[in-house]
Amino acid sequence: MKAVKRIAIIGGTHGNEKTGAWLLKKFMKRPELVRREGFETVLRISNEKAVERCVRYIEEDLNRRFNPVELADPEKNSYEALLAKELNEELGPKGAEKTAVDFIVDLHTTTSAMGVTAILDSENALAWQAATYLKAHDPDVRIFTWKGDTGESDFVHSIAPAGFALEVGPIPQGVLRADIFEKTERAVHHILDFFEKLNAGTLEERAAEVEVYDSVTLLDFPRDEEGEIAGMVHPELQDHDYKELKKGDPLFMTLEGAVIPYEGEEPLHAVFVNEAAYYEKGFAMALSRKILKRLSWSDSVAPAGEASTALDEGNP
Amino acid sequence: MKAVKRIAIIGGTHGNEKTGAWLLKKFMKRPELVRREGFETVLRISNEKAVERCVRYIEEDLNRRFNPVELADPEKNSYEALLAKELNEELGPKGAEKTAVDFIVDLHTTTSAMGVTAILDSENALAWQAATYLKAHDPDVRIFTWKGDTGESDFVHSIAPAGFALEVGPIPQGVLRADIFEKTERAVHHILDFFEKLNAGTLEERAAEVEVYDSVTLLDFPRDEEGEIAGMVHPELQDHDYKELKKGDPLFMTLEGAVIPYEGEEPLHAVFVNEAAYYEKGFAMALSRKILKRLSWSDSVAPAGEASTALDEGNP
């Protein structure tokens, strides 16, 4: 197992999700808060211009710009495409044997009532260990597995060999809230604790499995003939992310007040319910299956420098 | 008293406040919902381009573009300045003896927990009557008087001789919520009821006074040496708009967790607490005084066509 020597905490990947950026500003002023034994904590506000303007992005979503093909394409030169290449040089490069940082936690917020959710999009054992530790130490935390369309992660944290995104909500875009700020800060400390203990060989927990909301599908809003949104999330589902949906449960309410129910035979759980940023992507929520995922703790929990097959394999 | 013959319901003045725009889309498809005896209901999405892009504005805030000097200035030609002139031609012109519409209700939303709030910014008796009727018929409704910096209203509804803005929240920018949609729709119906009864001479209520939150001052966020926001609304105040603040009550919490209390001697009430759009304007909340405002009902409540000094005076 490679040593975990540099861990990056990133915020401001979406400039109107203020919490991460402001938490980083705080840490940058008081770096002792994130200084730990055994590794270096790297702090990076990824899209400063978008933070300044309080917009999700300047030209296109930065958090979809880390596809290796796009990173290598000299023709890709939007503001965020160039920024992605810069971040990749600085913290990666992605896929290399030796990268500038070993792990990335990317801080996001959501208008959905998702509490603190770790978004895992790979089978990387170290990422799963860190997320499981976080969940064990904070009962608010849930794990959601995101399946992109490409099979390849395009996210900022994919620059490093391992990492995940943290989504905290509900909070509107463009605002700071003390409660959401505090939850995010607490989660960062748990994650840093994990790496400190991992490196020191003092990790006490050995969970064999973890509860996961495993992405199944995305649901769009009801739409009219012109393709315009013609309904809203039903009040019984709004603010109730992770609620189990059984056949017949209300999903949407049309502008006219008619109820559109969930029609699936299998009970599933709604996530990212009414997230503002996904209106433009054309979905109202994700549906997920609640599963117990088996973890290969015994193989992979080892202090830095020690050999571990699970981490090297990457796909336990 | 002039006849109230055309009433405009406006939405989409801020393009990321989706509720008003979508309610208008609904009414445009089913105009019978807002058809009443005695007057015509005009429906207008004011900033369609901003609604399409889901941004507050394209170049500058449309809802500050209706100053008569600016409307008359040919040099003012930003996207919203030109749009303001177009709206002024269509619905006004502002200040004219004869205007295309007699009353404007402009539909907004806020990230603040303001419930349904009528924002009054003039002493116009008809606007006060309509807002008081609304409040009498919906216990959720509050009235807040906004005092601009100029003494002159720059708002969209100032094109008509009378009108007000409706703020409904909390709701993030860029989303639709069934509860906020329904509250806004209900308020519009009460306002239309008022005009129907006013014109028919069947208004049953004669309130002599109304409870009002009268604007006193605006409070900025705590800031650091560089002018950056260094604190957030305190959790005890967040989501509690209209709460009475007494000396010593917590106002803000710094990023470090220190409490900044309210220092004023006079108890005041916080409004527009942590509204996303006001970060760029540099204020965290408005403070207001709760007062009972006397109304000149007996003079002004009269069916269309009848003489009424109160309405002609405009400043009871």
Image (spheres, coloured by chain):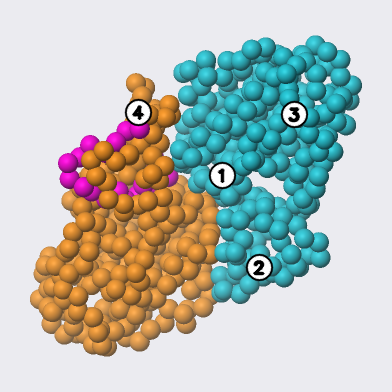
Chain colours: A cyan, B orange
Q: Amino acid at mark 4?
A: Arg
Q: Mark 3: give few (<14), some (14-19) or many (20+) Cα within 10 Å.
A: few
Q: Marks 1 and 4: which is nearer the front?
A: 1
Label 2: which secondary element: strand
Of B231 and B130, the residue lying toward us = B231
Which residue carries the number 1 mark?
A: A169
In which quadrant of the rendered view does residue A104 lie?
top right
Q: Earlier in the sequence, mark 2 or mark 1?
A: 1
Q: In percent of the image, x 19 and y 79: which residue is there?
A: B206
Mark 3 in CB contact with mark 2 (< 8 angstroms): no
Q: In percent of the image, x 73 and y 22: which residue is there?
A: A203
Q: CA distance from mark 4 to mark 2?
A: 45 Å
Which residue carries the number 3 mark?
A: A205
Q: CA distance from mark 3 to mark 4?
A: 42 Å
Say whether mark 2 and mark 4 are on the same chain. no
Q: CA distance from mark 3 to mark 2?
A: 40 Å
Mark 1 in CB contact with mark 4 (< 8 angstroms): no
Horizontal and vertical percent position of residue A15: 53, 35
Q: Is residue A135 above or below residue B183?
A: above
Q: Chain of mark 2?
A: A
Name the side, left or right, on which B95 lies relative to B196. left
Q: Amino acid at mark 2?
A: Pro
Horizontal and vertical percent position of residue A167: 62, 40
Q: Chain of mark 1?
A: A
Which residue carries the number 4 mark?
A: B223
Q: Amino acid at mark 3?
A: Glu
